[in-house]
Image: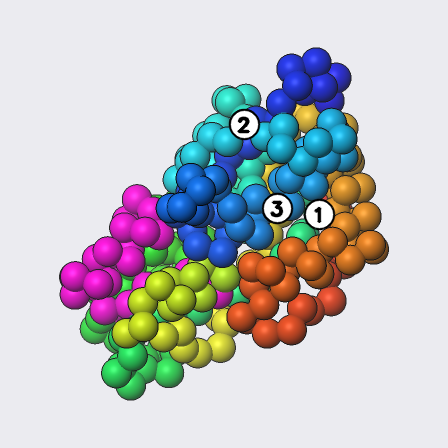
Amino acid sequence: MAAIRDRGTLVVGVSADTLLMGARNPLSGQIEGFDIDVLHEVSRAIFGDPDRLQFRVITSGQRLEVLENGEVDLVARAFTINCERWESIAFSAEYYHAGQKVLVTRDSTANGIADLEGQRVCAPEGTTTLTRLEQFSGIEPVPATTHTQCLVLFQQGKVDAITGDDTILAGFAAQDPYAKVVGEAISDEPYGIGVPAQNVDMVRFVNGVLEQMKADGRWAAIYGEWLGGLGPAPTPPAAVYGRTP
């Protein structure tokens, strides 16, 4: 923490192409979204200034790498907390609870992922959503570098569906009037902020920021701005603290 304060900026790994969560605004050029606003609040707590962020745009597959190599202080990129990742990094407490669904064409008769047998389904490399496709026989998984690449393949007719967290797919549906999100969530995806394993003091600090955001209404306000289309703001996730290796 002292090194970060001395540096004067918080280096964060983010998405720049995930609408609603972390995407570059084509008009302002600024990266914005739910994940980004959470990071602004961490910056505010450290420096008294929400804008002391140095963004490092990364893919889903790079999230662990940049933390393990110490290239960033934090990663907030729709990052699901799980035991495998805990082996090499640390996580904050959960700050959003997502679920895996599927995006299909507007005229599709599919009601969920179980109806996609024999079809090509895209998900980014390095994600739990791609791994989970292996549980469904007859589906042809199509890996892509990013969620945006999945959307391009979908719009070109090279894949039949995209699977991902409901937050991400909601952003796609908002961009493409010929697409829709279907089905119940087939997984629980608790999002946490990734932290280098050795930075236990940062984990405690971020958890304190998240708790304060939930208590004073900032979490609900950020949810309403970016994810209100998913429904009314749920009760913020309870603080269930994880572990470091």
Quarter the C terminus occupies: top right
At x 74% / y 27%, what residue is drawn? 47
User: What's under tag 1, amino acid-wise?
Assistant: Ala
Start-end of magenta stretch: 138-166
Question: In terms of sequence position, does the residue under pointer 3 or pointer 1 come before the other?
Answer: 3
Residue 209 visible somewhere in the drawing: yes
Q: Which mark is residue 37?
A: 3
Q: Position of residue 13 (x, y in %)?
A: 51, 34
Quadrant hosting residue 73 = top right
Mark 2 or mark 1: which comes first in sequence? 2
Q: Is residue 169 visible?
A: no
Q: Which residue is mark 1?
A: 93
Numbered mark located on residue 174 in the image: none
How busy is the neighbourhood of tag 2: few (under 14 within 10 Å), some, or many (20 plus)? some
Marks 2 and 1, how far apart at CA: 22 Å
Q: Give percent across and percent down for residue 52.
A: 63, 28
Query: Mark 1: which secondary structure?
Result: loop
Label 2 is placed on what type of residue? Gln
